[in-house]
Amino acid sequence: MVMALGMVAESSRLQVTAGYESGHTMVFVQGDPGAPWQTVYVAQPHTQPVLSLAISPSQDYYITSSADAIIAKHPLPSARSIWNSGMKPLKVLQTKHSGRQGLHIRSDGKIFSTAGWDARVRIHSAKTLTELAVLKWHKEGCYATAFAEIDPSVAGSAPQEMQTSTPSSEGAVTRQTSSMNIVQQRRNEKAQSTHWLAAGSKDGKVSLWDIY
């Protein structure tokens, strides 16, 4: 039974990643519309059903999590690494924490999150799979996570001070209004440029975190 899916579309070429109840994961490629699908990667790093998978923003690897305590990083056909991988995962991490799902990779590709049945949200390095942080707040199992998408045009932009030519009697009011607008603009830009992380739990609550 198929438990999780991912897809990459490159012009007329499609790649589908799949995770199965058996613990297997596969990558299928269709070169042109109507062409037969080819299986280009098969691995079974998990002993329990695959619960979630996520494709990296660079589209050169994907990561799977499972009902077991393993997180695995796999190559994609678009990356040369798949031909040198010997049909094996690039990295496998035994986390000692079973029941990891809701895996999501941040838009900059640096870290990823998982939701745990133990009510913990864990942050890992996408490069090494090393655990970087454990977020504790929920009282019951967590099942979903999501990162905010960051608009590069917003991140790093500087607020512009308004230029006015009002009479001196109104100067103080104008300067005060201008300052308030700049403060509000800075707040908006911070909110839009923050890598917010949301986590959902069986307790019916959603928590919001500011991660690095």
Image (spheres, helix red, strand yellow):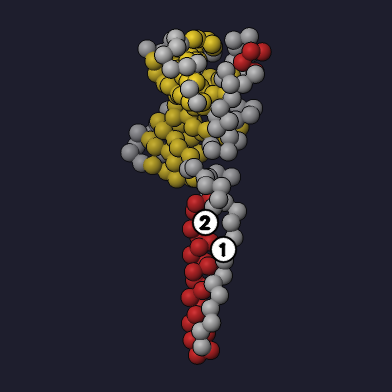
Q: Is residue 46 visible?
A: no
Vertical arrangement, residue 29 with respect to residue 192, above or below: above
Amino acid type at mark 1: Pro
Quadrant of the rendering where the C terminus is positioned = top right
Identify the image quadrant of residue 102: top left
For disc 2, the marked residue is 189
Point out residue 55 in the picture as x, y percentages from the top left corner: 52, 27
Residue lying at the far right of the rendered structure? 84
Q: Secondary structure at mark 1?
A: loop
Q: Mark 2 packing: few (<14 Cα in 10 Å), some, or many (20+)?
A: some
Mark 2 or 1, nearer chain start: 1
Lateral position of residue 67 relative to residue 61, left or right: left
Residue 62: percent from left, percent from top:
54, 24
Residue 155 in sight in this render: yes
| Residue 33, quarter of the rendered image | top left
Q: Is residue 100 above or below residue 175?
A: above
What residue is drawn where x is 39% and y is 37%?
200
Q: Pick the residue in front: 207 or 172.
A: 172
Q: Position of residue 75 (x, y in %)?
A: 59, 19
Q: Nearer the viewer, residue 181 or 119?
A: 181
**Labels in figure, total:** 2
Q: Is residue 151 above or below residue 80?
A: below
- Look at mark 1 in the image and give the residue it sits on: 159
Quarter that holds the N terminus: top left
Badge 1 local density, few (<14 within 10 Å), some, or many (20+)? Answer: few
Point 41% across, 14% down: residue:
34
**Gap in angstroms between the C-alphas marked 2 and 1:** 9 Å
Horizontal and vertical percent for residue 88? 60, 12
Q: Are marks 2 and 1 in contact (CB under 8 Å)?
A: yes
Secondary structure beneath dot 2 equals: helix
